Image: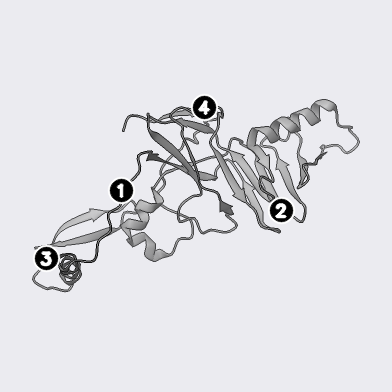
Amino acid sequence: MDDVICFMTDNNDRKPQKISTRPRLPQASLHCPPITAGNELGLVVYPNSSSNWEIQRVPEYIQVTYTPENPEIDTPFILSVGEDGSRMVQLIPKDPNDPSTQEDYQQAMKRIDTLFNDFHTPAGAITLKANCWFQTPENWDSIWMGITNQFDPPFPDTYTVRVQTDWYSASTNVEIRYQLKIGQIVKVSKENPIGMVTFLERDNINIKYSEYSDQLIGKQNEQKNEKLDKSYVITEKNLTPHNIWYQTNKK
């Protein structure tokens, strides 16, 4: 595979990366190299915003609370987006006696467009923009999806989409789409990734179906018995990304 090109819209040390750990995974998973490999299935991506956002779905609309990174030069606001497409922005100025201007509202709309691509497509869904875009080699696609093995609530249900990024360039950001349940709250901050991107070759895989053979069953039993056979000694050690040793038995 040739190089994948990553275009950054907002770096700030938040480049897409592989992360082998997950918060609150059971301790036993730290000893399991296949789970570690699953964690590293793709690159986690970060939001196209350095501020804090709280998003909640309530009946008939989604409410977004914006807390700026620098409140001295930016104004907090609350956005309500109805399932009928209506929008209402309520600015929260530092001084309640200081009236909001048209420029303040335009700035708030700019902040919304920086992070959100759309709302309620379908109802209850939001699409967040990541701070990057990938261009893949010919015949390779990008898979935009949720973070694998991420069970820490309130991480929402996430759509998985496949984009032919070897030629498609109408968007400038990876887009991660969540499906919110009524009452569910999602918090977005610059430190926490919002989704994952991996890459897949476009060629179809041909699957050949077969019955279990005696040879395969014998091989499986042999590998199971290796761990119990005292005649086998440990001759090789491997180190997981968690600095935990796991061992491979060989004759």
| Callout 1: SS | loop
Tell me which residue sits at (19%, 69%) in the image: 217
**Residue at mark 1 to residue at mark 3: CA–CA distance:** 39 Å
Tag 4 or tag 1, which sits nearer the N-term? 4
Tell me which residue sits at (30%, 58%) in the image: 244
**Residue at mark 1 to residue at mark 4: CA–CA distance:** 30 Å
Give the amino acid at mark 4.
Answer: Ser
Give the amino acid at mark 2.
Answer: Arg
Q: Are marks 1 and 3 in contact (CB under 8 Å)?
A: no
**In the depicted structure, whether residue 51 falls above or below residue 238:** above
Tag 3 or tag 1, which sits nearer the N-term? 1
Q: Would you call the spot at circle 4 few (<14 residues within 10 Å), some (14-19), or many (20 or more)?
A: few
| Callout 2: SS | strand
Tag 2 or tag 3, which sits nearer the N-term? 2
Q: Are marks 1 and 2 in contact (CB under 8 Å)?
A: no
**Residue 41 in view:** yes
**Residue at mark 4 to residue at mark 3: CA–CA distance:** 55 Å
To which quarter of the image does residue 35 belong? bottom left
Marking on residue 169:
4
Percent x, y for residue 66? 71, 41
- What residue is pinned by disc 3? 233
- What residue is pinned by disc 2? 57
In front here: 191 or 70?
191
- What residue is pinned by disc 1? 206
Tag 2 or tag 1, which sits nearer the N-term? 2
**Residue at mark 3 to residue at mark 2: CA–CA distance:** 57 Å
